[in-house]
Image (cartoon, rainbow, N blue to C red):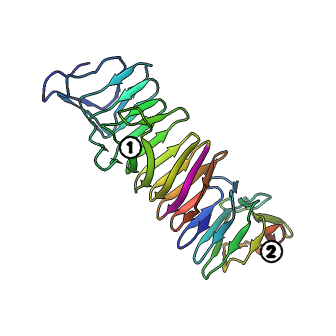
Amino acid sequence: MAVSGSGRMSPNFTNVGTLTAPGSTQFTANSKLVVQTDGMTKIDKLAIPIGGASISGSGTRLEITNPGGVIPVVGQRFLVLSGAVTGQFAFVIGATLGNITLVPTYSALGLELVAT
Amino acid sequence: MFLTAAGAEIANFGTLNIDGTTARTSNGLGRIVNNSTGSLTHGSTATTTLNAALSNLGTVMSFAGVLNLPLVNQLDPVNDRVTGGVWIVEATLRLPANMTIVRNAGSITLGQLGSIQQSSGVDGFLLQTNEAPGTVAIQQTRSLGVVVNQGVLRAASGSLTVSAYTQTAGTTEVMKGATLVGASGPVQIVAGEIGGLG
């Protein structure tokens, strides 16, 4: 799967949920991954068990929405992208929730947001 | 219900059931206008041919049996295009002439047991372009060729396999438990959104 241009991917349009991509997924210039969190334990997740994700090009964005307004506690971790990840999103939008910042952390697990 | 004279017209604003085993009109005379609030339903196991001119501004629902629609304003057999109307196909819907749905600007729900066929009975749903504001919801396991989406395309249940898929506008929705797979080419979201539901 490839998301490019002004294309957006949301693992779930209505609730917090998981979308499993059947193969490798590319985010290229100006594309967006939009995730929703409940601020407590749940966040939308894009699972890519085969092939992983590659993020490249300028203007790629990870957008976080928190419609309930619940603020996570420090140390809370949210896995938003599972699978191998190469590259990083150029911008993270909506990462500040009250006095907490969700910091993107890329690891072998994928991409987590860590409340700090 | 029979329309037996040229110029005779039924304007439906409610629910009009057209069950039965025989043609419901006389050789193309008269017409039925299914208005925006109207539902035209076929729920019997019979084969029914509605051979008056039909204008579907509302909803046509095929729940059982076979519904032949040889003369419909919104089904364009020359361009293999649905130009409008809502079409809910839970049973068999047969299209005019040898039309195959290749382009859609209406709203089509292809149910779990639904079958859209050419007048000859062969498969008549080979969607290639879903135009805005077209909506297609597929509730069955289905294979298509190269698909371009500019409207709303919903993989509602089962597995929707496409040779390749490009979205240049609009939305692709993948319901919980359903899958959308590019078999031999990529699923490309150039604009608009793709996401899960449920």
Question: From the image, which quarter does the N terminus of chain B lie in?
Answer: top left
B167 up-or-down from B88: above or below? below
Distance of label 2 from label 1 (alpha carbons): 50 Å
Looking at numbered disc 1 in the image, what kind of residue is underneath it? Thr
Mark closer to the observer (2, 1): 1
Q: Is residue B8 left or right of residue B62?
A: left
Q: Residue at x 47, y 47 (%)?
A: B136
* Extreme-left residue of the structure: B6
User: Residue B143's spot in the image, x, y percent?
Assistant: 55, 46
Start-end of magenta stretch? B159-167
The local secondary structure at tag 2 comes to strand
* Extreme-bottom residue of the structure: A58
B100 up-or-down from B89: above or below? below
Residue B162, magenta (yes or no)? yes
Q: Which residue is mark 2?
A: A105
User: Residue A87's spot in the image, x, y percent?
Assistant: 72, 78
Looking at numbered disc 2 in the image, what kind of residue is underneath it? Thr
The chain containing the residue under callout 1 comes to B
User: Residue A97's spot in the image, x, y percent?
Assistant: 72, 70
